[in-house]
Amino acid sequence: MRFDWKEQRLKDFVEINPYSRLPKGAVAKKVSMDKLQPNCRDIPSFELAAYMGGAKFQNGDTLMARITPCLENGKIAQVNILDGNEVGFGSTEYIVFRAKDGISDKDFVYSLVCSSLVREPAIKSMVGSSNRQRVQTDVVENLLISLPPLVEQKKIGELLRSFDDKIRINNAINHNLQQQAIALYQNAFPYGVDDILPDGWRIATIGEIFNLHDSKRIPLSGGERDRMTKKVFPYYGATSLMDYVDDYLFDGIYLLLGEDGTVIDAGGFPVLQYVWGKFWVNNHAHIITGKRGYTTESLWVLFKQTSVRSIVTGAVQPKISQANLKSIQIVLPPIEQLNAYNEHIQPMFATIRNNQDENSRLSALRDTLLPKLMSGEIDVSKVEI
């Protein structure tokens, strides 16, 4: 520890679950737990809803999931979706951290909460039933941590923020490219199943245009994942990256579609992941590639415009079965036009993959620097940023 760092309780350094005024019934921006992305600073989306309860927050605050497995999966974010003194709200399962004027820096606070100095003791403090364990807030409040002066906090926060800023830019570029691909598809293939189709077009089912690789999937138990120590390859679930393992089943470019649990979004469209490289998939996602002119990319675009609400079964545990998925009707365009579209979007998706790979490298470098900066092992007091 540097001589000018001071050991103090976390609650003396930051405000934890601070007061923010938001009357019941007031319409405000809501950030539910599913909106937070693992190991991602920025909140990608929100909804407008009447406030009836839950954590309240303002811009610059850090949200940390306090429930398993969300915290273990890295659901920690910094609020940046509000205007001025606007107050938003979200899940009751958030702990909210706010920097204190003249004492702590908001970017440093976010990095501190992400670091093992806060996150690991928080996870160890969890109590409750095995699948609903929660962080004990008082344990977090009373953590003793060696912390730098405000000037040094700002330098550390700014240095780490530069990684997240670049990740945010790459994500924005990828989102724009995805929207372009969807708009191009809608322009090239404007017909629906109820329209009169030109020559060469026909009604088909989704089952005719994709290959399903579910039979190759072998779920891993929690114990098996724990015994895998190298943590090299992604292990995917229905909605997001869940873990890393030291073996893989798939190698290539695939589309993952939620099979049970969270299978559709608010609009009734399927929960999708566009993935590539070497990875393992658990038993909560269908593994898909395209055929008959459809690539994985054009299949992604098609699914992004295809409501699957009518084929979801199960009131308690929503599910999309293979049979129901294959039965959805679509309009199949002529192969020549489909090939031309594929040629147009392949460079776009290549850029998306490159940007995401860069994000992974940036995240890894950020996470390597984080504990060294937070412990004072790397001295940033003389760094010019």
Image: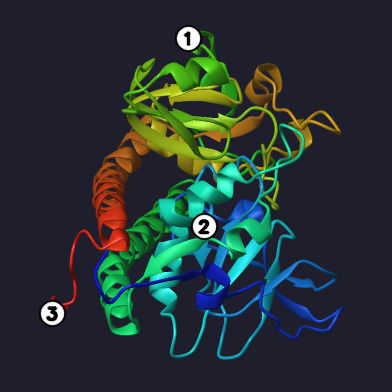
Residue 18 screen position, x and y as percent: 66, 78
Mark 1 and mark 3: span between their CA atoms?
Answer: 52 Å
From the viewer's perspective, is the residue at label 1 or at label 3 nearer?
3
Mark 3 and mark 2: span between their CA atoms?
Answer: 28 Å
Residue 358 screen position, x and y as percent: 24, 49
User: Is 116 or 256 nearer to us in this picture?
Assistant: 116
Picture mark count: 3
Q: On screen, 196 above or below 222?
A: below
Residue 216: which numbered mark, if any?
1
- Which residue is most to the front? 3
Is any part of residue 271 visible from this angle?
yes
Q: Amino acid at mark 1?
A: Lys
Q: Amino acid at mark 3?
A: Glu
Along the horizontal axis of the image, is 364 left or right of 213? left
User: Is 284 or 136 nearer to us in this picture?
Assistant: 136
Mark 2 and mark 1: span between their CA atoms?
Answer: 33 Å
Disc 2 marks which residue?
76
The N terminus sits in image quarter: bottom left
Q: On screen, 223 above or below 309?
A: above
Residue 310: which numbered mark, if any?
none
Is any part of residue 43 visible from this angle?
no
The C terminus sits in image quarter: bottom left
